[in-house]
């Protein structure tokens, strides 16, 4: 994990909030430069940490078989970035 002096970067834009590791499900408070997509997990050391979503609607949420709830969507694929499981064949209303 890299620790930096924020005073050296006061003019930069930063985001902060609760983060979760897609690998070990560790949750922590994180601060990172704006635009950061993945964070290094302080627990397991993988670069599979993401900021938790700022809005989570009530109700059921789809999760991958590995327990991950974050998915990457391309024009041809819907897949889990944690285990690689492809969900492209699932009809959209079921997602």
Image: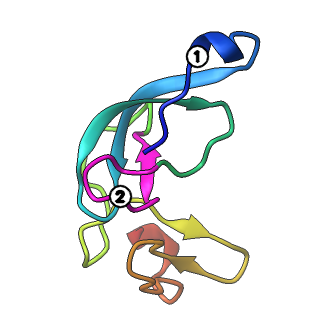
Question: How far from the left and from the top, in percent, is residue 18?
Answer: 35, 31
| In this picture, residue 93 sits left or right of residue 64 | right
Classify 10 Å Cα crowding around label 2: few (below 14), some (14-19), many (20 and above). Answer: some
* Circle 2: element type: loop
For image coordinates 62% across by 10% down, the residue present is 7
Quadrant assignment for the N terminus: top left
Earlier along the polypeptide chain: callout 1 or callout 2? Answer: 1
Q: Measure the alpha-carbon separation of dots 1 and 2.
A: 22 Å
| In this picture, residue 6 sits left or right of residue 26 | right
Evaluate if marks 1 and 2 touch, with contact meaning CB atoms under 8 Å apart.
no
In this rendered view, identify the residue nearer to me: 59 or 22: 22
For image coordinates 69% across by 83% down, the residue present is 76
Question: How far from the left and from the top, in percent, is residue 90?
Answer: 45, 83
| In this picture, residue 14 sits left or right of residue 29 | right
* Circle 1: element type: helix
Q: Which residue is mark 2?
A: 45
For image coordinates 68% across by 15% down, the residue present is 8
Q: Is residue 41 magenta?
A: yes
For image coordinates 48% across by 65% down, the residue present is 71
To which quarter of the image does residue 57 belong?
top left
Q: Is residue 27 magenta?
A: no
Q: Which residue is mark 1?
A: 6
Q: Is residue 86 above or below residue 22?
A: below
* Tag of residue 36: none
Question: How far from the left and from the top, in percent, is residue 74?
Answer: 68, 73
* Chief secondary structure of the magenta portion: loop
How many tags in the picture?
Answer: 2
Q: Is residue 82 above or below residue 55?
A: below
Magenta highlight range: 40-52
Classify 10 Å Cα crowding around label 1: few (below 14), some (14-19), many (20 and above). Answer: few
Question: How far from the left and from the top, in percent, is residue 84?
Answer: 45, 83
Quadrant assignment for the C terminus: bottom left
């Amino acid at each position: 994990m890299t620790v930096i002096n924020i005073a050296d970067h006061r003019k930069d834009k930063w985001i902060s909030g609760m983060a979760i590791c897609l690998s070990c499900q560790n949750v922590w408070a994180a601060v990172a430069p704006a635009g950061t997509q993945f964070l290094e997990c302080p627990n397991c050391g993988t670069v599979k940490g993401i900021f938790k979503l700022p809005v989570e609607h009530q109700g059921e949420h789809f999760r991958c078989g590995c327990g991950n709830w974050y998915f990457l969507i391309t024009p041809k694929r819907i897949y889990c970035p944690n285990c690689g499981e492809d969900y492209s064949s699932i009809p959209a209303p079921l997602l």
